[in-house]
Amino acid sequence: MSSPVSSIRNLGPAMEEACARAGITSAEELREIGADVAYGRLIAAGVQPHFIGYYALVMGLQGRPWNDCKGKEKDDLRQRFDALKAASRPEQSGIERILNEIGVVARR
């Protein structure tokens, strides 16, 4: 029998719903694929990336409270999060990238 995603510490109904949209349907599956793969799938499914949500997921999978993340560990997680976000961005043409940088079109 599988457990709901919300049975993992720090994760509630909103994360459970987001995981379902990303095809992650159980706590066991989430534990098996890990935080980085899961968060990449969440972003691909349209979830807006948010650092606190990411590290709450990481901490939850370790059985720790979400606010237990501090110092170097938090800095390291920020680098992982930024890499996940960067990997999820579609390639932009040169002109689209420049227009994004100067704020002419909405940022992605």
Image (spheres, rainbow, N blue to C red):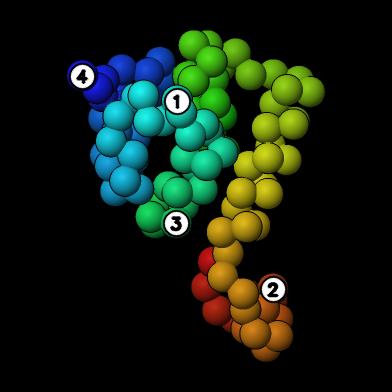
Q: Which residue is mark 4?
A: 1
Tell me, yes or no, if residue 105 can be seen here: yes
Q: CA distance from mark 4 to mark 2?
A: 49 Å
Mark 3 vs 4, N-terminal side: 4
For the view shown, which residue lies furthest in the right direction? Answer: 72
Choose top left, top right, bottom left or bottom right for residue 77: top right
Mark 4 vs 2, N-terminal side: 4
Q: Quadrant of the N terminus?
A: top left
Q: CA distance from mark 1 to mark 4?
A: 15 Å
Choose top left, top right, bottom left or bottom right for residue 8: top left
Category of crowding for the residue at label 2, using alpha-carbon neighbours closer than 10 angstroms: few (below 14), some (14–19), many (at least 20): few
Q: Which residue is mark 1?
A: 31
Rendered residue at 73%/22% (across/down): 73
Check disc 3 and report its element: helix, strand or loop. Answer: helix
Q: CA distance from mark 1 to mark 3?
A: 19 Å
Given this view, does label 3 or label 4 mark the residue nearer the observer?
4
Q: Which residue is mark 3?
A: 44
Category of crowding for the residue at label 3, using alpha-carbon neighbours closer than 10 angstroms: few (below 14), some (14–19), many (at least 20): some
Category of crowding for the residue at label 1, using alpha-carbon neighbours closer than 10 angstroms: few (below 14), some (14–19), many (at least 20): some
Q: Residue 101 got which mark?
A: 2
Q: Are marks 2 and 1 in contact (CB under 8 Å)?
A: no
**Direction from residue 60 to residue 74 in the image, left or right:** right
Q: Amino acid at mark 1?
A: Arg
